[in-house]
Every structure is written in C-alpha cells, then in structure tokens.
Image (spheres, rainbow, N blue to C red):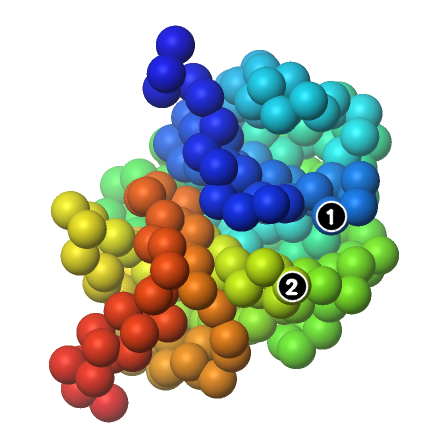
C-alpha cells in the first residue's frame, strides 16, 4: 500500500512512517543509523520499511534519539533487542532513557502534566543502556558526516542532525510543517518556546537544503531560505 512506502529524502536518507511519528533511516556506506523509533508497537513497521529499502534490522548499527518524548523512544527497547544497535542520546537525557530518572510528561501545562502522568508511564519506553552521550557540535560515533546540533527548547536535550554531505537537516520536533507552512515546535509540548526559537536561529549557521521533520512532510530545495524567512517574522 502506498502509505506504507518509505519517503525518499536523498541518496542516503529515507523516512519510515511508524506509530505516531516518522523514523529516519540514514545509510552512509552501509553504516545504517535510525533516528527515533516511534511509539510502542512500531518495531514491525520499522522492519517492513527497512525491507522495502533493501535493508534489515540486523544492519542497524546506531539508534539516535532526537529527544525523550514517548512518540520518539517508545519502541526503543524492542528495536535495540532486535538489532543489537548502540544507542546515542544527548547527555542531558541519558538518565531518562536509562531509567534512572522518571520520564517527564511532555506537556508544558502543569495541570495537563498531572492528568496525563499515568498515560506517559504507559507509553514511555523501557530503560535502555546509552552507549553514546552526545554533545553539541560533535559527530555520531563511527560517522564523520552526521553532525549533532543541540537545539534545546522543545526538551532540554533536543538535538538536530545534519547530514553534511547531502545537506539534509533532521530536526525532530524542533520545527513543524503544517499545511506546507513552517512553524516552531508545538507550545503544548514544548518546555521553553523562547529557547526553542534561539535554537532555530542557530541552525541558520549551517548549510542545508532539505529539512526532515518527525511528523510532517520534508521541505526540499530551499529549506534554509524558508526557515530564515519564517524566523525573520518572529520576535527575538
């Protein structure tokens, strides 16, 4: 079925639609990296998507999380078990992924955080060992092409990834592209929107032509100009 087909981004980048999000597949010289894993129950969709790309779960070497929200790491435990891949996450969210810290609710409103706490505990992924603690302006271990850009605001440890050779920027939930209109992260589930905007301005220092989102269609070709034009309309 057409909706199950991976979304082709560039020579080495594709996206798989899973439960609640998109998983980005980066395949550079047979070094297969998954960015995020979707809600719990997404393993089968990831496996099917990889098969359509001519890949297998066993080929996945690294799983990178853009941030800790359940729609991004809910299936992490199952995917790690199926792949034996190492896990990489920003250093500030390691405790959440490993289970030594309680998974915070993604909601910014205190009342919503309280009401949804039981649901968050149910949807959060099980604890997984983190092998790589990521820092700003570094690279994914084993790759000199996938650059880490710390973009806090949506969460404290939110990251974006730049595939430098292909000028593809993966932003997680740091940006939205609703109805072909770019905007900042959802304020409903963003801890500090002002910090998020400052992070987005930082992205303009890099060279990219494509933006990949976790929940929306990519922007191709003139993505840097599109982001700059929108940021120019925002208050600092």
* 174 sits to left or right of 11: left
Q: Whole-percent x and y of residue 113?
A: 30, 50
* Quadrant in which residue 118 is drawn: top left
Q: Residue at x 56, y 22 (%)?
A: 49
- Residue 187 marker: none
Across the whole image, how many numbered discs are drawn on residues?
Answer: 2
Q: Is residue 196 left or right of residue 25?
A: left
Residues 212 and 198: in front is 212
Contact check, label 2 and label 1, Cβ < 8 Å: yes
Give the mark, 2 or 1, whose residue is nearer the N terminus.
Answer: 1
- Left or right, residue 136 beside residue 140: left
- Pinpoint residue 212: horizontal percent, then vertical percent: 43, 52
**Hey, which quadrant is residue 198 in on the image?**
bottom left
Residue at point 72%, 63% (across, down): 145
The label shown at residue 165 is: 2
**Is residue 72 visible from the viewing direction of this image?**
no
Which residue corresponds to mark 1? 28
């Amino acid at each position: 079925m057409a909706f199950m087909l991976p979304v082709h981004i560039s020579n080495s980048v594709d996206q798989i639609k899973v439960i609640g999000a998109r998983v980005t597949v980066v395949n550079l010289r047979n070094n297969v990296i998954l960015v995020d894993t979707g809600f719990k129950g997404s393993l089968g969709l990831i496996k099917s998507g990889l098969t359509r790309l001519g890949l297998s779960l066993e080929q996945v070497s690294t799983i990178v999380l853009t941030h800790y929200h359940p729609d991004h790491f809910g299936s992490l435990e199952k995917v790690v078990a199926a792949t034996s891949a190492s896990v990489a996450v920003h250093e500030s969210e390691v405790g959440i992924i490993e289970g030594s810290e309680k998974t915070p609710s993604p909601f910014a409103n205190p009342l919503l955080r309280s009401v949804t706490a039981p649901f968050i505990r149910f949807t959060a992924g099980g604890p997984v060992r983190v092998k790589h603690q990521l820092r700003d302006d570094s690279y994914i271990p084993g790759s000199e092409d996938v650059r880490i850009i710390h973009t806090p605001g949506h969460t404290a440890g939110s990251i974006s990834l730049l595939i430098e050779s292909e000028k593809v920027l993966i932003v997680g939930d740091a940006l939205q592209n609703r109805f072909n209109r770019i905007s900042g992260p959802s304020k409903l589930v963003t801890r500090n929107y002002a910090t998020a905007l400052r992070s987005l301005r930082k992205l303009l220092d890099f060279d990219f032509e494509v933006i990949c989102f976790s929940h929306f269609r990519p922007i191709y070709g003139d993505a840097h100009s599109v982001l700059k034009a929108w940021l120019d309309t925002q208050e600092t």
